[in-house]
Structure formats: C-alpha cells, structure tokens
C-alpha cells in the first residue's frame, strides 16, 4: 500500500491528534463538589488516580474512539492505494484519440469510453507532484487541458472529450506535446531547476489506427501506448464519386467502393437514395478482411487487401439534390456506413476568354465547347483591361463562372475563378521571376480533382515562368526547381496558374489537355463541381455568399445550427465539420437552403476499427502498456466508512453515558 | 438499595420536623414519656430501679430457692419446706434495678452533610432516647466521637437531667475526621457498665467500622446500630465532570457522572449497607437503617418501636 498524498496525511495527523489530546488534558479541570465521603465513589470509580494523565487517557473509551476517527480521516486524506506502481515521471502529456474509430461500439459503451476509463485510471494514479496535460487529436490536435497537477480538473476535461468523425492524425498532437514539454526543458542557457526537469512522457490513449504514424518521429520523451477497444466487425464506404455525363448532363453516375474490415464474410444491402427516396438497392457480398501482416508499418497504411467491392449506379436527375448511399448493416462504426453527395443542377457555364492569339483561342474554344451548355466570350487583353466594370462584374463578383487569361498579367481580378495560361495575377505574394527551361515535369498530384485522369507522361514543356507563390498555394504540377501548375485559393477568388505558354508545350494537342479543361470547368467554377461540396470531416467548408446576405445559418447533422455573420464577405468559411452528415447553409431566408455539403468519412484507416496489435511511430515500435497492471485500488472509501461507523458508535456511547 | 424505613403516608417532613436549633419540642417529649427502652438482656443495675436485675433482692416476685448457709438472713428461710423435708432452704426474690442506656453518636464532619444534616438528626435521636431513659429512671450515658472519644455525659437519672442532656448535645461540635475504631476502643475502656448501647453513625469510615463494633461487643452490652444516611448519599444528584472532595480528609475523586457510574455507586452503597447489617446481625447486634428523609418523630415512635428498641 502506498499513499498518494503522504504529506497531507502527516499534516492532518500532526495537527489533529495532538489537538484532541490537548482538549482531553484541558477537560481535566472539573467542577469541585464536597461530599461526605469518597469511600463509595472510590470503589465505584476505578480510575481515582486521575492525576496521572496517561492512565486516564488509556482508560477513556471515547478518546480512543475519537483517535480512531481522526486516524481514519487522516488515513483517507493520504489517499492510500494498494498495488501502486511508483513512477519517477513528473511531466506527462496525455494524447487522447478522438477520431472516428473512437465511436466504434464496444461491449460496454463506445471505444472512447474505454479510452476515458484508461486515461482516468492513469490520472487517478498520478502522484501529487506529477503534472499532466491533455491533448486530443483527430484531424487536428487541440490542447484541452494545459499542464496541471489538479487531478480533478484533468478528470473533468477527460469526461468532456467527445469523439469526432475526423480521421486520426497524430503528427500535430506529437508536435504540440513536444512543444509544450519543451517549454519546460529548453530554457536557453538556464541553470534553473526548470532546465533540469525531466523530459515529458507522452501517454497515448488510442486504438492505434493512426494514418500518419509512420511519418512521425518522437523527438523527445518516451511514448507509451495504451491500446483501447476490441470491436473489429465493420463494413464501410471507402470511396464515392458522382459524375454527370459530359454529353447528357441529366445523366448521373454514382460510383462507390465498399470494403469489409471485419473478420467474417459479410452480405449486406446497399441503398441509394435521392432526396430521401430510395432509388436502388443492391446486394454486396464481401469476404473477410485479410489478416494484417506483422509489418512494422502496418498501422499507418494497411497493405493488406480487404475484401472490397465497387458499385455503380446510374440515375437521371437534372435538378439539385442530395444523394445518400447507405450500407444497411449494423456494425461497430456507423459513420462509414453512409455517404452523402449533394449534386448541383447542370447549369450553363459562362466563360470569358482573354487572348489575342488565334491558336490559343482555337485550342481553348474546342476544349470549352466540349462541355455541354457552356458559353464562351472572347476579349483581347486590352479590351479586358478597358472594359467597363458593369461588363465584367455583377455586384462585386465576376459575371463569368470562369475567366481564361492567356499570357496576361492583370490586377483586375474581381471575385471569381481564373485560369492563367503563362500569366500571373498581380496580387501580393505572387510573382514570376525569369524562366525555367530544360527541366522536366517531375510530379503531379493525381488525387486533386483538377488533375484527375490527367496523365502528363507525354507532355513536354519547353519553358515556364519561375513562379514565386505564397505558402498556402497548392502545387499541382512541379518541375525540378519550380512549380508548373498551382492553385491559389483566396477568399472569394480561385486562381489556377499554368506557368507556361500553351504554345510552348505540346499540352494543347494532347488528350490530357481536354481532360484537364473538363476538370477545370467542372471543378473550379463556384458550385460547378459536385466534389467541391463533399468534404472530409474536419475540412473547412467554403460557400459563396449571395449578394446582400448578412447572416448565414449552418444547420448541422446533429440538428443544431450555427449562425455566422457574413457581412461583406464574399465567401463563407466554416470549420466545425467534425461530424459526418449533411451540412445545410442558408442565408437570411430561413426557409431556403442555398447549399448542401456532404461530410463523409471515406477513410480506410478509420474504417479498419480493429485495434492495432502494435503501434509504430516512425521506425520505432511503441511499448504497449496494459491498463490492468496500473489499476490502483483506492482505499480511502474504506477509511471514510470506518470513520463514520466509529463516529456513530462514539455518539451512541456518549449519549448512553450522559443520559441520566 | 439500602433498606428503607417504613414511612406513614400522612407524615410530611415540613410539618413534623422541629426547627434545627430545637432538639425536641415539648409536644413530642410528651409523647415520648409513654415509651420505655427495652433491653433484650437483663443486666445488673447500680441502684434500685424499675428494671428487673440479675441480682436477687427484696422484691415481691419469687425467683428461686437455695441451701441455707450460715449467716443468711433467717427471715427468708422457708419454714414450710423445713417442716416437710427437715432441711433449711432460703427463698430468693428478684431484684429490680435501673438500666444503663448509652447513646454513642458520631459527630465527625461527614455527619454534617445532607439536608437535614445527619448530625442534627443523630442528636435528636440521642436526645429522644435519653429522654425516654430519664423518664423511666434509667441511667443514661451520652458519648460522642469523631476520631476519638469526646467528653461524655454519664450517670444521668431522672427527667430533671434532660436539661444537661440538651445542653450537652447542643454544644457538641461536628468536626474532625471519623475514626470509629479508635473511639470505640476508648469507649470500651471507659464504659464498663452493661446495658443498652445505641450507636448512631453513617459508618463512612475508611479505616473500617468492624474493629470498633468488636470493641463495643466486648463489653457484652445489648447493642443497637443505627446507620443514618442523607438522601443525597442514597441517590446523588450529581451530573457532569466533577472533582469530588471528601469533607473529612479532603481526598479527591475525579469522576464523570454517567448512568453506569451512578448505578455502580448505588450498587456499592447497597452492598456496603448489607455488609454492615450482616456484620451486626451475625454478632447479635440490632441493625437499623434510616435516611434523614424519614421524619424524625416517625422514626422514634414507629420505626424504633417496631424494631424493638422502644416499647
């Protein structure tokens, strides 16, 4: 048995017990009464010789009981525990996973409950001198409790942690943990005790399904892993896409991929709904997931091939709507059983081309006309610069869904979407310095919607302008030293920069150019792409603000709503998208939803709910700690019980004595 | 519980009790004149009196015959027997003499306790018994003691002596620690006459009372032991944490009054009284117990009469 608060015990006992004894000594001053003879009293009272105080104390039952009460209370204050494991750690960082897999149903509650239990036990076992902080992580990490020794505060904060539907990304949490603990350690040139403080220990409470685990390195301190959860049965939607037919925009194709992560084969129905109406139900049969290979990097990216199946649905729908795909099955994780895709109605796109070169006009016109219902207007750069405001803008926004600028650097960029071919926008942070030539295309981001199905294998670019871009720009195609294609997203304005002149490459005459332009026309114009309205949990929702709107209301999937002042903003940004479901945005008019956004998990790492058997951070395997070994049996309730019992007995004895 | 004397329901202490400075009121003395002290034994007296004596004398009551020896008074020869048996027998007659009545009262400081005080109560009893004795021409002796025998008043006879009795008792100081053994020893040495001895005390003597009673018994007297306690001693009205001080030797007992302690005290008192009674009864002494709560006249007229001391 060990005391967690030994100083408290000693202090309480040192103060109270002498005080009680002193009270008893003081009590010896009695009222004097003269009687005829003490002969019989002497016989009646055995302790006549009360001048010897210890003899008196020894025989006083009430004092004895009161001493027991005080000792019990002091004992309880000392927080005695049995089976205590003494640790030398002083600075602890608790990383608590709150990703989607934490919502998995376990035998007794959710997986997060299990995590909370383990972390709670850990906190209760901390010594008084230990300091701990709590960092939760899912897609992002946040400090929910700064360093404190107050165990009650830590427990309170633990209880307040809720699971999100976001994927697990531990990187930011590890950086936070190291940063916070480094504040204590890295005092430059200091010889203070703080500098000598031990390195923080990082206690990870998770199921070990961390998407970025192998990319991380624990620079400082020791990481310990407390695995949670047992459930493994799960089937989830891992990918979904909805496309309109290029030639017939009324035709919709829904592609989805389902995967079984459980240990048993599964047969289930998959239901497709449009605006709540069931359109189609298909049955899928998925084999059991292949067992994980005991590779060191297993937890980060599962390399096994679980049984998976793709489904395609065809439907005709020309208006806006909400497509819902649902696996009709009750499994451990519900968040990945459904996916929502809001679809926008096919509407004619209005495109402005700014070029004074006929070949470019010819290539672009052919590429743009390929998309049904698209109107293209041409201007020369001079006309563009001199055009009256009313010709280009409408209420501060561009009148055109997309503006294509050929070799034209301009600062005339009202809110809208722009594609620069060989030009740069004249905005802060963006510039072109010189030219890059004799380099090859070394990388392009195939996963980005703009680059989907765009293969640049056979594309040669003779030279391109060396772009200097702000850090938040997205580089889609890169050369050896400078970016070739980049997307610059600002509030209310998206600029796609192609650093090269179309005529300096063979890009316009290659098939990828057509595909690329299709992607640009479908994705870049505001509301023009369905995938733009599909987010991953935790991603920022952006929505163009209609004119004269003052307030936006975002109706969340859980039924609550958030109000956001949009004032003079052109684009609404909203970050609380941690929950899977449909987010509806409306402006001012409460009855009219102007936009719907689907937040879907679509994460194989999270869908694989079976807890990782081992966890590796970087190349190091993390020591697993069994929660059971650390359980301390708190003994203070027994001490308090004894205290109350003895108090009752003492009260009874006292009353029995004085009642005459 | 100690033996409780019977108490007539009509009696109220306030109505019957004389004032503290008056030992006996005249009305009660008049009632006492009808009583006489009874001895269970027959003793030889000193002078002619109204009591039958062990001596043979000149009364009219025949007692016995004995053989004539030379020098006997020829007037007491029974000539009828001489005529029939031709032998000389002398007729003996009972002698009537006085009775020695001795009252031994405790005037140690422990007797000055209770309301009414045990000492006053004891003095009244002594006065009453002495008066009864004087009225009946008995020889009355009064002794008082604390840790020693005080100056006695002895050899009183006739009701005129009552004034001396009252003065003696009134002037008796109530002081000093009690030592009954020592006092009884001195009493035994000084008091050689046989008769009735009434000992009035609370018998709260830490040195013990047994030796003293043995001294008294050694004189072969008809002894009556009257133990007097105050009601405050029988049922103490004490509460709380107290320092009890013995009024005689200032010994201190620190007690926390509680129900178990009181019960234990009462049990001890009862056992003590039983012990005194047993000691007396086994040795042929008459044991009487009274608390000062019992009205004094009732004690004399009813209680002592019932116990056979008075008639």
Image (cartoon, coloured by chain):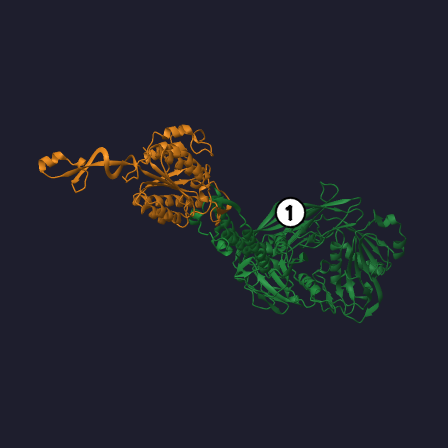
Q: Nearer the viewer, residue A559 or B37?
A: B37
Q: Secondary structure at mark 1?
A: loop
* Chain letter, orange in picture: B
Q: Nearer the viewer, residue A240 or A210?
A: A210
State whether residue A608 appears in this view.
no
Q: In the shown orientation, is residue A388 left or right of residue A124?
A: right
Q: Is residue A103 above or below residue B122?
A: below
Picture coordinates of residue A307 (x, y %)? Answer: 56, 60
Residue at 43% x, 30% y: name it.
B25
Picture coordinates of residue A144 (x, y %)? Answer: 66, 55
Q: How many marks?
A: 1
Q: Is residue A367 above or below residue B118?
A: below
Q: Colour of chain A?
A: green
Picture coordinates of residue B216 (x, y %)? Answer: 34, 46
Give the image quarter of residue B2.
Answer: top left
Q: Nearer the viewer, residue A409 or A178?
A: A178
Residue at 78% x, 44% y: name it.
A550
Residue closest to the far bottom: A438
**Residue wearing tag 1:** A558
Q: Is residue B297 above or below residue A62?
A: above
Q: In the shown orientation, is residue A603 left or right of residue A481?
A: left
Picture coordinates of residue A295 (x, y %)? Answer: 58, 68
Mark 1, chain letter? A
Q: Nearer the viewer, residue A612 or A337?
A: A612
State whether residue A175 appears in this view.
yes
Give the image quarter of residue A442.
Answer: bottom right
Q: In the shown orientation, is residue A508 left or right of residue A244?
A: right
Give the image quarter of residue B169.
Answer: top left
Q: Is residue B91 above or below residue A557?
A: above
């Amino acid at each position: 048995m060990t005391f967690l608060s030994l100083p408290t015990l000693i202090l309480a006992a040192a103060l109270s017990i002498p005080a009680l004894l002193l009270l008893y000594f003081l009590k010896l001053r009695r009222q004097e009464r003269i009687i005829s003879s003490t002969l019989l009293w002497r016989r009646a009272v055995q302790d006549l010789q009360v001048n010897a105080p210890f003899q008196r104390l020894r025989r006083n039952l009430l004092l004895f009981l009161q001493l027991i009460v005080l000792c019990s209370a002091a004992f309880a204050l000392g927080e005695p525990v049995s089976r205590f494991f003494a640790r030398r750690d002083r600075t602890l960082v608790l990383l608590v996973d709150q990703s989607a897999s934490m919502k998995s149903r376990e035998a007794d509650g959710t997986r997060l409950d299990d995590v909370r239990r383990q972390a709670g036990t850990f906190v209760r076992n901390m010594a008084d001198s230990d300091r701990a902080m709590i960092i939760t992580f899912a897609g992002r990490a946040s400090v929910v409790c700064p360093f404190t020794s107050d165990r009650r505060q830590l427990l309170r904060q633990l209880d307040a942690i809720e699971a999100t539907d976001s994927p697990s990304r531990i990187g930011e949490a590890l950086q936070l943990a190291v940063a916070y603990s480094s504040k204590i350690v890295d005092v430059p040139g200091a010889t203070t005790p703080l500098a000598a403080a031990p390195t923080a220990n990082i206690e990870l409470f998770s199921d070990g399904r961390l998407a970025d685990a192998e990319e991380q390195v624990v620079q400082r301190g020791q990481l310990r892993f407390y695995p949670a959860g047992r459930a493994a049965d799960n089937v989830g939607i891992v990918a979904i896409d909805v496309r309109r037919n290029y030639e017939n925009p009324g035709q919709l194709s829904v592609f989805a991929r389902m995967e079984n992560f459980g240990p048993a084969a599964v047969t289930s129905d998959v239901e497709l709904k449009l605006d709540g109406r069931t359109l189609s139900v298909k049955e899928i049969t998925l084999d059991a997931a292949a067992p994980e290979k005991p590779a060191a990097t297993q937890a980060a990216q599962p390399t096994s091939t679980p049984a998976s199946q793709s489904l395609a649905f065809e439907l005709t729908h020309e208006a806006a709507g909400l497509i819902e795909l649902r696996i009709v099955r009750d499994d451990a994780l519900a968040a990945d059983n459904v996916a929502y895709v809001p679809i926008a109605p096919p509407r004619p796109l209005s495109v402005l081309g700014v070029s004074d070169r006929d070949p470019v006009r010819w290539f672009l016109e052919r590429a743009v006309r390929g998309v049904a219902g698209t109107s293209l207007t041409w201007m020369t750069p001079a006309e563009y610069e001199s055009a009256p405001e009313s010709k280009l803008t409408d209420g501060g926004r561009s009148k055109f869904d997309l503006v294509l600028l050929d070799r034209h650097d301009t600062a005339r960029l009202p809110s809208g979407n722009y594609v620069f071919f060989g030009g740069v926008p004249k905005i802060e942070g963006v510039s072109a310095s010189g030219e890059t030539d004799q380099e090859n295309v070394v990388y392009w981001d195939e996963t980005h919607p703009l680059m989907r199905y765009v293969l640049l294998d056979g594309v040669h670019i003779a030279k391109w302008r060396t772009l200097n871009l702000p850090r938040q720009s997205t580089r889609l195609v890169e050369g050896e030293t400078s970016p070739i294609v980049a997307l610059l997203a600002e509030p209310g304005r998206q600029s796609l920069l192609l650093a090269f002149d179309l005529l300096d490459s063979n890009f316009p005459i290659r098939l990828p150019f057509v595909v690329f332009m299709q992607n640009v026309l479908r994705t870049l114009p505001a509301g023009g792409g369905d995938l733009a309205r599909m987010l991953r949990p935790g991603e920022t929702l952006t929505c163009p603000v209609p004119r004269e709107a003052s307030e936006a209301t975002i109706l969340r999937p859980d039924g609550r709503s958030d109000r956001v002042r949009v004032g003079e903003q052109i684009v609404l940004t909203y970050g609380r998208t941690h929950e899977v479901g449909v987010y509806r945005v409306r402006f001012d008019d409460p009855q009219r939803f102007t936009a719907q956004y689907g937040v879907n998990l679509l994460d194989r790492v999270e869908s694989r709910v079976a807890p990782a058997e081992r966890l590796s951070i970087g190349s190091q395997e993390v020591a697993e700690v069994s929660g059971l070994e650390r359980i301390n049996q708190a003994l203070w309730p027994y001490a308090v019980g004894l205290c109350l019992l003895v108090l009752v007995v003492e009260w009874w004895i006292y009353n029995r004595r004085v009642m005459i | 519980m100690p033996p409780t004397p019977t108490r007539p329901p009509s009696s109220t202490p306030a109505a019957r009790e004389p004032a503290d400075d008056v030992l006996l009121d005249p009305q009660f003395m008049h009632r006492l004149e009808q009583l006489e002290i009874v001895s269970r034994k027959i003793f030889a007296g000193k002078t002619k009196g109204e009591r039958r004596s062990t001596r043979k004398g000149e009364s009219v009551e025949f007692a016995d015959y004995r053989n004539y020896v030379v020098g006997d008074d020829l007037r007491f020869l029974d000539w009828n027997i001489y005529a029939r048996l031709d032998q000389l027998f002398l007729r003996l007659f009972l002698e009537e003499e006085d009775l020695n009545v001795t009252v031994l009262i405790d005037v140690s400081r422990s007797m000055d306790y209770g309301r009414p005080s045990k000492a006053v109560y004891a003095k009244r009893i002594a006065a009453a018994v002495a008066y009864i004795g004087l009225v009946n021409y008995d020889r009355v002796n009064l002794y008082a003691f604390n840790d020693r025998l005080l100056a006695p008043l002895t050899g009183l006879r006739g009701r005129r002596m009552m004034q001396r009795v009252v003065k003696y008792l009134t002037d008796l100081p109530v002081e000093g620690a009690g030592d009954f053994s020592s006092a009884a020893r001195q009493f035994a040495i000084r008091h050689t006459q046989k008769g009735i001895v009434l000992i009035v005390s609370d018998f709260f003597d830490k040195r013990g009372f047994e030796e003293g009673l043995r001294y008294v018994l050694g004189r072969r007297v008809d002894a009556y032991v009257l133990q007097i306690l105050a009601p405050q001693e029988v049922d103490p009205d004490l509460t709380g944490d107290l320092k009890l001080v013995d009024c005689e030797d200032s010994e201190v007992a620190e007690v926390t009054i509680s129900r178990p302690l009181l019960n234990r005290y009462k049990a001890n008192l009862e056992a003590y009284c039983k012990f005194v009674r047993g000691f007396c009864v086994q040795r042929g002494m008459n044991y009487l117990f009274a608390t000062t709560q019992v009205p004094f006249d009732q004690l004399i007229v009813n209680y002592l009469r019932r116990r056979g001391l008075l008639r």
